[in-house]
Image: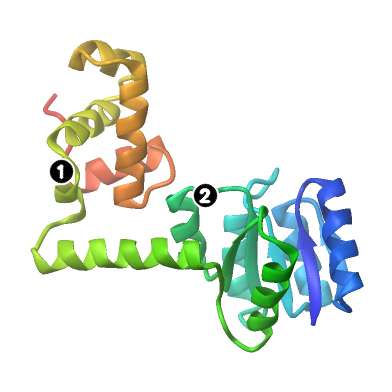
Amino acid sequence: MRVLLADDHALFRDGVRSLLQARGVEVVGEAGDGHDALEKARALRPDIVLMDITMPRCSGLEATRLIKAALPDVKVVMLTVSEEDRDLFEAIKSGAQGYLLKNLRADEFFDLLSGVARGEAAISREIAGRILRECARIHAGQASGMAPQEQCTERELEVLRQVASGSTNKDIAVTLHITENTVKFHMKNILDKLHLNNRAEAVAYAARKGLLPPP
């Protein structure tokens, strides 16, 4: 197994490299950001790229999409601290072969990594459970004929419309008579339910679906 490490924290890369080498895994290279990961993957053709999500210049999610487009045989496994559902599902959509949290025990980490070489997905039971729950939720929505935005509450749609009109969290809180923390809570739910990454994507989604408030 030939592995490329992509993480912007050099100390973390040192620790993972030592751990891998102690188990007989060949670490062929290291990258400190997404662009570097793509270049190293092209040059070194590793079997697996262990990819962090949050990195400068180019995120791990974007790097995963680029690597899978250029090198479809290279397997990418996210190794991250992010437990956000939208990162998990975006990683899967981007072509990642697995999603591992950095708080894994070493034995479980190596068991899952070994499975990748056999064509299995490197996903812990907890992550697998979240994927199954989301699939069930989507299936229930489809079975009921609900569009994604219809799975949002009326309050969440109100917040989405306010965001689409260019309002800040403070503006929305004043308009809807709620706190800014409540606005942030609703925004997180909106992004999770609609599988969006940020406010800009939320505005674009609202425009496509005709959810923009009247002028």
Residue 210 — which label? 1
Left or right, residue 149 beside residue 43: left
Q: Quadrant of residue 191?
A: top left
The mark nearer the N terminus, 2 or 1, is 2
Q: Where is 68 relative to 79, above or below?
A: below
Task: Check disc 2 and report its element: helix, strand or loop.
Answer: loop
Toward the bottom, the furthest residue is 118
Q: Position of residue 131 (x, y in %)?
A: 40, 65
Toward the left, the furthest residue is 144
Q: Quadrant of residue 135?
A: bottom left
Dot 1: few (<14), some (14–19), or many (≥20) neighbours within 10 Å?
A: few
What residue is shown at x 37% (from left), y 21% (from top)?
A: 181
Mark 2 or mark 1: which is in front? Answer: 2
Task: Check disc 1 and report its element: helix, strand or loop.
Answer: loop
Q: Quadrant of residue 142?
A: bottom left
Left or right, residue 179 beside residue 212: right
Scheme by which the image is coloured: rainbow
What residue is shown at x 23% (from left), y 48% (from top)?
A: 208
Residue kind at label 2, given as amino acid type: Glu
Residue 83 — which label? 2
Q: CA distance from mark 2 to mark 1?
A: 31 Å
For the N terminus, which image quadrant?
Answer: bottom right
What residue is shown at x 62% (from left), y 62% (from top)?
A: 78
For the C terminus, which image quadrant?
Answer: top left
